[in-house]
Amino acid sequence: MTSVTSGKRDFDLLIIGSGISGLTAAISAAEKGLAVAVISKEAYLSECNTSYAQGGIVGIGKNDSPELLEKDITLAGDGINCSEAVRLLATEGPKLVEEFLVKKIRVPFCKDESGKPDLTREAAHSIRRIYHIKDKTGEVIENELIRFAKNHGGIKLFHSHTAIDLITNTHNSRNTQERYRRTRVIGAYVLEESMNRVIVFFSPSVILATGGAGNLFLHTSNPPGASGDGIAMAYRIGAEVMNAEYVQFHPTVLYHRDVKRFLISESLRGEGARLMNKKGEYFMEKYDQDLKDLAPRDEVARAIFREMELEDSEYVKLDARCIRDIDLEKRFPAIFGQCKALGLDIGKEPIPVVPAAHYFCGGRKCLHRSSRCEQISLCVST
Ligand SMILES: Cc1cc2nc3c(=O)[nH]c(=O)nc-3n(C[C@H](O)[C@H](O)[C@H](O)COP(=O)(O)OP(=O)(O)OC[C@H]3O[C@@H](n4cnc5c(N)ncnc54)[C@H](O)[C@@H]3O)c2cc1C
């Protein structure tokens, strides 16, 4: 039986989550002299969405500017974005990738002949500005961050530690009058798996960096741990959650009885692969005459869903046989290899695919706009 003990740890900052958000925050805080704890519920710190990111991360393109990036992000968000947050991201994000990931953490992004980052392009970006490490960008970034954090004396890393709930003055104090004050987060109850007990982490500041919630859905590209724990914990202490209905579905995740969560990259369609229904008809032209198979993700995912409904089918197919002049095995080694292992030669037969929950766009409403809660920030993104 699991017991609650008096096991207790004190830190200046508790970070729940060891992906790119949690570790970046941990390193930045530790460099300012704070004693930081990072906990992850997984047995390996690296088991998180970050490690599965393939394509790359937004850096600085040629003739790029924060204004241009801001415009691209706003367009991609259909104008519903919080403009303050978009501006901050567009102004500070690429600079931080340079200063933090490249210069401090020394992430070995691929370089061009002149020794500058090799820029690639992704959907909704008007120019090439994506830094990448082939199709393993996330895995390399995550491993470098873990290495850096482990070597930093100010950070303690705990794997197999599952946060259950946040501790607040208004919910947990023995002083009844505290419930009439503003809510302050003062720590978290955490299941320490190896001891099978719940312990208390006390900290005047807590950052929730628990990733997304893809596993709420039948199909997802996310690892099993992406179950929305942080949002639920924040909600339970009275935080306002917003935009939770905005979930990006990636149009093409492999549909297979035994292999779940395997992404079939958009770049396959970028090179010419086309979506077909059960009857063998290429259907994207019906939904977007200009962009066809390369329409934005939400449009393509909706079109696939519609075709599945019309045919009462559980998937559609992606035909990579349309790709000409490219050695599929060399250009897409991971996809080629995974499909081959399942007995599918993607050069000879179409790949069964289905849209899958990929990226959770919602989260905790900005702290400074809320009167009830303070000292909690939520980074949810997957
Ligand atoms: C297949 C795939 C491909 C992608 N490709 C790209 C790409 O090319 N470019 C791009 O920019 N983005 C990409 N993304 C999105 C990107 O990976 C995420 O936005 C990003 O990694 C999220 O980082 P994070 O730190 O917020 O969360 P995560 O990396 O998911 O980390 C969450 C952490 O929280 C921990 N956690 C959760 N709940 C608890 C709990 N109760 N107690 C303790 N710990 C907990 C987890 O164990 C984990 O350590 C991709 C995502 C996927 C799934």
Image (cartoon, rainbow, N blue to C red):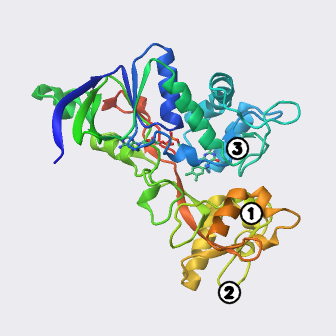
Mark 1: give few (<14), some (14-19) or many (20+) Cα within 10 Å: many
Location of mark 1 (residue): 269
Label number found at residue 72: 3
Q: Is residue 309 visible?
A: yes
Q: Amino acid at mark 1?
A: Arg
> Which residue lies under the disc numbered 2?
279
The front one of 7 and 181 is 7
Whichever of callouts 3 and 2 sits on the residue coming sooner in the sequence is 3
Q: Residue furthest top?
A: 33
The answer to whether residue 165 shows anywhere in this view is no
Q: Nearer the viewer, mark 3 or mark 2?
A: 2
The residue at label 1 has a CB less than 8 Å from ligand 1: no
Residue 349 in the figure: left or right of residue 232: right
Is residue 205 found left or right of 330 in the rendered image? left
Q: Is residue 310 above or below residue 303?
A: below
The amino acid sitting under disc 3 is Asp
Q: Amino acid at mark 2?
A: Lys
